[in-house]
Image (cartoon, helix red, strand yellow):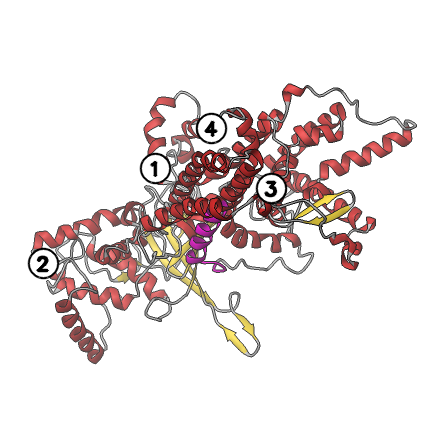
Amino acid sequence: MPKVGTRMVTGHSSTSRCYPRLARAAARANTDGSGPDGLGLRSARIRSLLLAALWSPLATPAAAHGFGQRYELPVPLSLYLFGAAAAVALSFAVFGLFVRPTAAPKAGERYDLLATALGRSIGHPAVLLAIRAAALGLLLLVVLAGFIGASNPYRNIVPTLVWIIAWVGLAYVQAFAGDLWRLINPWRTAFNAADRLCRRLRRGRELSLELPYPPWLGAWPACLLFSAFSWTELVSPNAADPAHIAWLAVAYSVLTWAGMAAFGRGTWLAHGEMFSLVFGTLARFAPTEAKSGRLLLRPFGAGLINAPPLSTSMMAFVLLLLATVLYDGLIGTGEWGLMEEALRPLVSGWGDPSMAIRTAGLIGLWLVFLAAYISICLLMSRLGDGRPGALETARRFALTLVPIAIGYHVAHYLQFLLVEGQYIIPLMSDPFGFGWNLFGTAAYRVDIGLVDARFTWYATVVSIVAGHVTAVYLAHVKAIDLYEARGTQLRSQVPLTALMVAYTFLGLSIAAQPIVESRSPAAPSAVATEAGTSVAIPPGALLPRVPDGVLAAPDKAMARVKLVYKVLASAFHDGTKTGVEDLLYAYAFAYRWGVRAGGPDGRYDPVVDRATAPLRRHLLAVRPAGVDAASKSLMVGDVKFLREVIAFEVYLDIAPGDAEWNAVVAPPWSTLPWHLLALMEEAVSRGWAAFSELEARRRGVPWLDLVRSPELNTKLAALVEEFEREGYRPEAL
């Protein structure tokens, strides 16, 4: 999804204010206990956890662009992957044993929701007209705000309304409630209004020419348009630009109305209007169906089973829908970044290498999915005694894959919708970024702690597994309708089940990867253009000095970049709350142990040196800018929940550029409270242990382990008592 925004920090973690790929990094970085370039915290190795915890606030911008709330899995990741895949495979056996033809969802007589008093009120023509007019008004708002509103995506309602509310949020409504898009489609509403006006002015003549639609064309126009839409979403660097979105909306509107005028409204909606096909496909899974002026209840997935065989183009469209959702997660993984780096020299003459690679990857993954699915259907056809053929089998079973696409959509975008979707609240009051406050919500601040990494991981696992299990069930029911012999029904489903097991394993593997992003270095001209910009370092700013790490006034008065972080002062694992001293001490640690300067007690570790070198190279000063104890606090009855937000300024000697990229150079992020860091430092200074495995071997001492070393624990317990008696305060503070 589009990438824009600045950086925010939660507790001793941070989450990015941005669009999906970056936003999901906050919840998925280190989900499996690993991360790039020393950022990961592996639960299987306590010593690695401690060492990584020391280095994590000092990460380099080599790979990671977001740090998130960490969640350590209670079991190894491999058990989750194989367990989830086994659950999908086991579901096939269960359905094969217990699902009979009578258990398949039937259309039959169903309950009409519009027959109730509430339903009749909602279904009143005036209410429906108001809903349609509101949707059309939002389309006009997107165009108007894109052209005349602020260019900053966080001050303009367009990116939030389009990418979060309309695309992500409406997809959930379609899948789990019903086909709302059929009611609110603004292009359909506008064309209907124009058609009525045309009939009045031209004495009954319709607006559409009703040209014959070529049967061979099928849904390929929608496939092409949805490919372009996905490219804009996943590849284009301008996806979050309000003006860019507005121009695309205008172009798509002209194309859609031209298609309706040429071939008829219904024909173009069924073949060329991509949103009708996307949302209509998702709505087949929903528990409601609009039919003959009624809104009927039905079992989930019934619309996927009772539908007639798809056309070849529509089958390809369903595979495209599945491929694009999975591709969104794939391009954020470290493996994809390594592949991009390897391929970059081969496409250096094709403009932007990353765009070329990602464009080819988007198309290539769709073709791979198509080839894999058709190959599986060929095996299904042969195991089903050759009837129907491979292509006919593919068309009949394509809709059974829709629950998988829905599951991936939930896995990838739920956390994004719940957190980033809150931006619509202040933007409703100031949609153009003009400083308005129409509804009194302009001052609303997003609660970035609404969901955590634990929730996101389990939601991901449940949604992916549930989507695949549902797909296995629907495919089995479809096979019951297609084949008469019980053995043939079961044999034909083995290849498709195997494919779904592989999808499960792949989907969870991608979800568990830390999110990384590769970027091309800034062009020299861009750096030179901005080289003259500078910002004054204010009084009260601090910089650790070498070699003792004591925080003192910085040597320089000007910086090239100033970044402001908002740190939510949540609690550490021992119950102590994050404070300014915890953030400052992490910087002091980098200078105390990362510089070979003959400091006291031989304080130096070459591994810490390498990990913190980029920070020390560019950091000019840090400054705590105050604590906000009001905006995040809330009252529940007579109980007040106090949530403090620390404003923290970081001054860097680095070329101004993308705030997201600059923000990873020296973030104020600490996973350990200062008193635990100080205790560990003292243990290393006294020669009891070493921070890194390399330094431990060189000195002939144990690698620092606060958990499994009884001898070290005894020494540290005595040291704690000593510090308590003396009222010890580290030199750096």
Q: In terms of sequence position, does the residue under pointer 4 or pointer 3 come before the other?
A: 3
User: Which secondary structure class fits the magenta region best?
Assistant: helix
* Camera-nearest residue between 677 and 108: 108
Question: In the visual, does 672 lie left or right of 198?
Answer: left
Tell me how far mark 1 sits from mark 2, CA to CA: 36 Å
Q: Which residues are magenta?
A: 449-467
Q: How many other residues sit within 10 Å of disc 2, few (<14), some (14-19) or many (≥20)?
A: some
Tell me how far mark 3 sits from mark 2, CA to CA: 60 Å
Q: In terms of sequence position, does the residue under pointer 1 or pointer 4 come before the other?
A: 1
Disc sitting over residue 335 in the figure: 1
Q: How many other residues sit within 10 Å of disc 3, few (<14), some (14-19) or many (≥20)?
A: many
Choose top left, top right, bottom left or bottom right for residue 255: top right
Q: Secondary structure at mark 3?
A: helix
Amino acid type, label 4: Thr
Image coordinates of residue 724 in percent, x first then y, are: 22, 78
Q: Residue at position x 64%, y 36% from top?
A: 307
Amino acid type, label 3: Leu
Image coordinates of residue 293 in percent, x first then y, are: 78, 45
Disc sitting over residue 359 in the figure: 4
Q: In terms of sequence position, does the residue under pointer 3 or pointer 2 come before the other?
A: 3
Choose top left, top right, bottom left or bottom right for residue 218: top right
